[in-house]
Amino acid sequence: MNDRLPHEKGFHISWDQIHRDSRALAWRLDGHGPDDGNWRAVVAITRGGMAPAMIVARELDIRTIDTISIKSYDWQKQADTKVLKTPDAELMGDGTGILIVDDLVDTGKTLDVVRKMYPKAHFATVYAKPKGRPMVDTFITEVSQDTWIFFPWDMALQYVEPYRGQD
């Protein structure tokens, strides 16, 4: 019998892993922008997309970086999606040449909101779940829908009891 809660089917990501996976995302995107393979700007979906966007921007030598702030979770529960901050309107246009980066696409609700705002942008995430996968153009790793991803910015190092007890 499994007594674990659904969010306890965890996929723990270290800082090293998010760095490697974000670099892999950059390599996958390299040369695929609409301007002779280049991208005009990177827009991070805050907060989770900030670390991957920074790494992608560094790897692809993109100096124009902005953010869009979307709230779609209350703690570990999905909530109504709310846009808190948008990027520079003149920069964005319809999204052509813009690379929008997030850490994860879960159900796709967040990306759906952003895609309606910038229909020609390219959407890239490091991780993707099946329900949200159709909303993303490029991703690195797919995980099952019932997996909870623990990102390094959400964790602290501490002792954890062994799964089968204390022997």
Image (cartoon, rainbow, N blue to C red):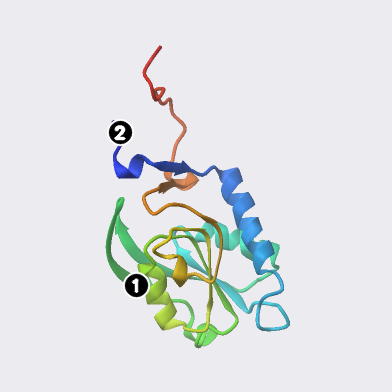
**Residue in the image at 41% along x and 42% along y:** 10
Residue furthest to the top: 167
| Residue 92 percent across, percent down from the top left | 51, 83
Q: Nearer the viewer, residue 50 or 133?
A: 133
Q: From the top left corner, tell me how far across and down residue 108 is, in percent.
A: 39, 67
- Quarter of the image for residue 131 reads bottom left
| Residue at x 46%, y 65% (from the top left corner) | 133
Q: Nearer the viewer, mark 2 or mark 1?
A: 2
Task: Tell me where residue 55 sits by quadrant.
Answer: bottom right
Q: Quadrant of the N terminus?
A: top left
Is residue 33 placed above or below 129 in the rendered structure? below
For label 1, the residue is 83
Mark 2 is surrounded, within 10 Å at the Cα level, by few (under 14), some (14 to 19) or many (20 or more) other residues, namely few
Dot 1: within a 10 Å radius of its alpha carbon, few (fewer than 14), some, or many (20 or more) residues?
few
Q: Which of 102 and 88 is in front in this view?
A: 102
Q: In this view, does 35 lie to the left or right of 128?
A: right
In the rendered image, residue 146, in percent from the top left (x then y), is placed at: 36, 50
Residue holding disc 2: 2
- Could you tell me the amino acid type at mark 1? Val
